[in-house]
Image (tube, rainbow, N blue to C red):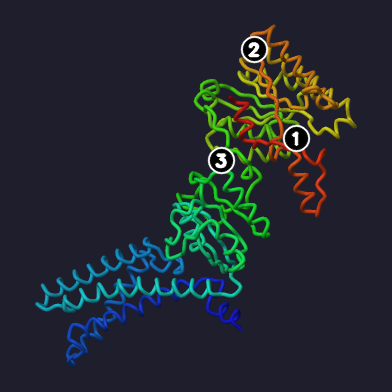
Amino acid sequence: MHKKFSEMINPPKHTPRWIVFLIDLVICLFSITISFFVRFEFSISEEYRILLKSVIPLVLFIRAVHFLSFRTFAGLIRYTSTKDAERIFVVTSVSTLVLFVINFINFFISSRFIIPNSILLIDYFLTIILMVGSRLFYKTLYYTIRNSDLNSEKILIVGVEQFAAAVKRAIDRESLTGIQIVGFIDPYNKQEGNKIENIEIYNINEIEHLIQKHDVKKVILATKNIDPNRKNKIIDTCLNLNISVQTIPDANAWINGELSVKQIKNIKIEDLLERPPIILDKKRIQDYLKGKVVLVTGAAGSIGSEMVRQITKFRPHKIILFDVAETPLYELELELKETFQFFDFETVIGSVTNEYRVSRLFEAFKPQVVFHAAAYKHVPMMENNPTEAVFNNVLGTKLVADISVKFGVEKFVMISTDKAVNPTNVMGASKRIAEIYTQTLNYTSQTKFITTRFGNVLGSNGSVIPRFKKQIENGGPITITHPDIIRYFMTIPEACQLVLE
């Protein structure tokens, strides 16, 4: 019964604009009528009763014209903000000024005012109060009914800074379904007992109690000033209680300076690192990339594509995206066109083992810096296809390296793997051979050859993390090499920044 009543009062569709427009006119009618009664202390003579009836059409017409011009009815009332109040103030002021002008023109013509000026002043203030007040009343009623719904989703927000308040405003502004914010959690217990927009701030030690007491379904991490250990403790508590955990993006990714509910995402694997993210010397990176033509082989892969995204930040002259996989390369091209509209890049389909294709590429674009990320890296697959591993990882690297020397490339960075250390499989051995060859060229050419070895990179193609996630989703077990093994990871952006530096 409660649910049906809530759905009846709180329908999913917004109130039609023409109804809002008519309600505003009714408010204006009520305001001018009350203004007459207030002016004459609720004792109006017959003369002024006739005057009231005669001026109502004029007042409503002037107000209606300005409401249509300023579109005061266009916004959703449940999202009423200070901007809407400002618009109402402006439109009421302008329309009242027009009424004053008409009043004085009539006075100069006939020596009498159409409407007593005192009544216009009363009507002016009363109209603003009633229009703003009606919207705030509806907004309050809307959220009271929505948040009191027995089926509303209960959430907790971790954080007490501007990010936490931004999450609440985004939920109030955009959420069409019932969401009730149970409270804010202070990670450092400094503001316990205070409130943010009338919602209680709780001690971090109360999080488990609050989740169980209010049947909380979701926790949103809305703080950037929290150490990893404290954050992981909160996440562990939530996951143990089968509670969804979400995070918000950095402020520079917000839309027009405001957080959107759509930007609140489930927690990512890199958010679970037990150490602070690596911070690198970006100026040093820019010094050798700015204004250069950069070639990235394997550009459509998880590592190569992130390399491209990172490189664009350092203002190179042009980036050449080279890969044999057409679909992911096309998707990367669309992403770059949307994100970096004025950036110069070129996508080229081809294999690093195709000498003619690679040579033509170097002739056409003359790259100055090469990041060689093209490789086969799935260990089990390469065990079953050793010829392809050697052909692509060894001969492909040799070909790109030789042509780089021929065309006088300044720097050649080869992306390798930790499995090249004392290799025990075909993939690792093929990468080790490629390493040795490029290191040899470093002593016999003007090109500077650098080799970087990746370890366990979170989210990369070939990483164990996606496999672990699937095994967990399927109910287990998780297959590991030893019960006591500890694996250390870095994020794809971190790995790529290390390569750039």
Q: Which badge, 2 or 1, comes first in the chain's sequence?
A: 1
Q: Is residue 353 visible?
A: no
203 and 417: which is toward the camera: 203
The residue under the point 25% across, 86% down is 53
**Other-residue count near label 2 (Cα within 10 Å), few / some / many at <14 / 14–19 / ≥20:** many
The image shows residue 395 at horizontal and vertical percentages of 80, 19
Which residue matches tag 1?
325
List the single residue furthest toward the top.
444
Front: mark 3 or 2: 2
Q: CA distance from mark 3 to mark 1?
A: 21 Å
**Other-residue count near label 3 (Cα within 10 Å), few / some / many at <14 / 14–19 / ≥20:** few
> Label 2 amino acid?
Thr
The image shows residue 215 at horizontal and vertical percentages of 62, 67
Q: Which numbered dot is residue 339?
A: 3
Q: CA distance from mark 2 to mark 1?
A: 28 Å
Q: Which badge, 3 or 2, comes first in the chain's sequence?
A: 3
Front: mark 2 or 1: 2
Quadrant occupied by the C terminus: top right
The residue under the point 64% across, 27% down is 320
103 and 451: which is toward the camera: 451
Is residue 36 shown above or below 211?
Answer: below
Which residue matches tag 2?
447
Q: CA distance from mark 3 to mark 2?
A: 32 Å
The residue under the point 67% across, 41% down is 331
The residue under the point 59% across, 75% down is 150
